[in-house]
Amino acid sequence: MKHLLKLEGMPRGAMEEILASAEAIKAKRGGGETKLLDGQTWAMIFTKSSTRTRVSFEVGIRELGGAVMFLNANDIQLGRGELIKDTARVLGRMVHGAVIRTYAQSDVEEFADYSNIPTINALTDDEHPCQILTDIFTFQEWRGPIQGRVVTFVGDGACNVPVSWVHAAAALDFELRIAAPSEFQPSAETLAKAGGNIACTEDVRAAVEGADMVYTDVWVSMGMEAESEERLAKLADYQINGELMRLANPDALVMHCLPAYRGKEIDAETFEAHADTIFTQAENRLHTQKAILAWLAG
């Protein structure tokens, strides 16, 4: 049984299959799509709030012919301490698949182990695989194959988004540069496991020079609010702005997985100058996640 739990260790062929499928799915949306999930009901279990992930998966499941139920963890017995494996064994007898957005990667993996239904990681503290597959699809839609290109991530390089970028870079053979203070860089263990052409530096200008894509994310992720003041101070020099973008390739894309906090990780002018790319990136969550669902159903 297939799951999408992380990009770490995911074969290149599987990624490429999803990316190709996303292109076809987007092209024929509303034009006689195959209802691959007809007769199925999928559960979405979220302990972290969401806009794009929730809406894109709910719409995507319905457009593929399935029914969907949204389960906030506080509304089911998980919120009262029921074990993940017990919830998994119950839902696995009732629904046909699960989309989980939560804190611990181990919770998603344990659910997949015990439920015996296809399970998708819609975000954990360790990885955000759906987002990065979407980002790569968006890049390729605008600029062609990502192989051999340069992607620069600026900001908190140790959070789930850049970690998933690390594993994607190793699998798909593009150069990844992470510009972040040393304490906000991926662990040596993560980099060693991934391999690939990946460089971490505190020199943000060097990292952006000649880049084909410059990417950022919020500096204070969910669950880190108590560290907000300290994180904002340490990351203040890692903002994407017009001066920094002049070092990138002239046609470099700016991406942000949203929500964006203008004046922090990106300035308002740069954000608005690249808004078309950023909101196409957001839209593409729908098409890529439908491709993921199709891949799991195949």
Image (cartoon, rainbow, N blue to C red):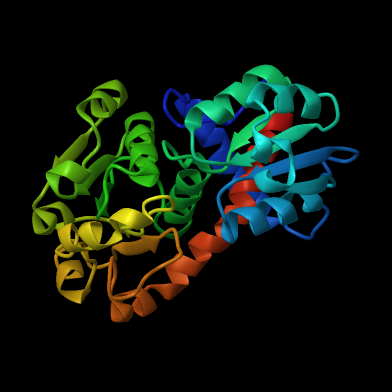
Query: In x, y percent, where is residue 193?
Result: 30, 21
Residue at x 38%, y 61% (from the top left corner): 255
The quarter in which the N terminus is drawn is top right
In the foreground, 15 or 219? 219
Q: Is residue 190 left or right of residue 36?
A: left
Residue 214 x, y percent position in the rendering: 28, 58
Q: Is residue 220 visible?
A: yes
Q: Residue at horizontal 80%, vertical 25%?
A: 90
Number of on-image labels: 0
Residue furthest out toward the front: 80
Would you identify the image quadrant in which residue 154 lies? bottom left
Q: Where on the picture, by quarter, is residue 36?
A: top right
Q: Is residue 33 visible?
A: no
Residue at left offset 57%, top offset 34%: 17
* Above or below, comparing residue 146 to residue 113 in the picture: below
Reply above or below: 112 against 214. above
Side of 203 where 180 appears, left or right: right
For the C terminus, give its image quadrant. top right
Instruction: Give the image location of residue 15, x and y in percent.
Output: 51, 34
Q: Is residue 189 above or below residue 148?
A: above
Q: Kindly identify the residue that appears in the image at 30 percent across and 81 percent down.
A: 269
Nearer to me, 276 or 217: 217
Whether residue 86 sits left or right of residue 216 in the image: it is: right
The percent position of residue 150, horizontal first and vertical second, equals: 25, 48
